[in-house]
Structure formats: structure tokens, C-alpha cells
Image: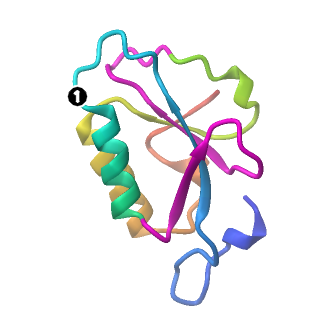
Amino acid sequence: MNNRHQGSPSGLPAAPRRIGLKYCGGCAPRYDRVEQVRIISSSLRGVIDLLPAGGQDLEAILVVAGCPTCCVETRAFGPLPILRIRSEADTRLLIDEIKAEPSRDLAGSTLSVVG
């Protein structure tokens, strides 16, 4: 994890965490993926910045898949932790985890998978 995200005395990151956003192809969505990203962005405003997955200085990739299969190819993201949202419940879990411990290592998230 980049040192600038070690956190302040309040437990909040010193700067918003840079997380790349990757949507699935949308072949069989079971929920509104775009709306869930809006919820994440507004709920975690100032704590995370969701950026294009090909961006620089990212500390994780958030894959927003429309179904439990989550067939998005993630090898191109190399060693970055991959966080998967496959349902509205996953959205709530991600928000709750980051709010509970804003500076935590994202590789330790319950939504993290090996790329």
C-alpha cells in the first residue's frame, strides 16, 4: 500500500484511495451496476476515488460484475488486489468494510480475490 494512505490520526486516509473501476460486459446483469457504483462513490466520498482501471498509481481494482459468475478478465491488472462486486449486498459489504477501517489493506477485504 502506498504510504500516503497510511491514514491520519482520525483513521481516515490522508488522501482519497485511488481505486480503478472495471465493469463487466453486461451480458446478464441482475442489478443496476451503474447505480451501485453511484452508491459507492457517494457513500465513500473523500475516502476513495474511483478512476479508470488503466489509471496510474492505483492501489486496487474494483470489478463490478452484473452476476455471480464475474467472468471479467483481471490478469492485466497484475499484482493489484481485485475487489469484486457481484450483487447489491456486495456493495453494502464494501462500503461497510471501508467505513469501518478506511486505511485497511484492500488485499485483506472479504471481496478481494487473486487476480
User: SS class of the residue under badge 1?
Assistant: loop
The answer to whether 77 appears left or right of 52 in the picture is right
Q: In the rendered image, is residue 27 in sight? A: yes
Residue 3, position in %: x, y?
77, 69
Residue at the far top: name it: 27
Does the magenta segment cover residue 30? no
Residue 70, position in %: x, y?
43, 19
Does the magenta segment cover residue 47? yes
Query: Where does the N terminus fall, quadrant-wise?
Result: bottom right
- State which region is magenta: 45-71
User: Which residue: 55% across, 49% down?
Assistant: 108
User: Which residue: 63% across, 40% down?
Assistant: 81
Q: Nearer the viewer, residue 45 or 96?
A: 45
Q: Eyeballing the image, is 9 above or below 100?
A: below
Residue 93, position in %: x, y?
32, 49
User: Which residue: 70% across, 36% down?
Assistant: 54
Residue 77: which quarter of the image?
A: top right
Q: Identify the residue position indicated by label 1 in the image.
A: 31
Name the amino acid type tagged 1: Tyr
Mark 1 Cα shell of 10 Å, populated few (<14), some (14-19), many (≥20):
some
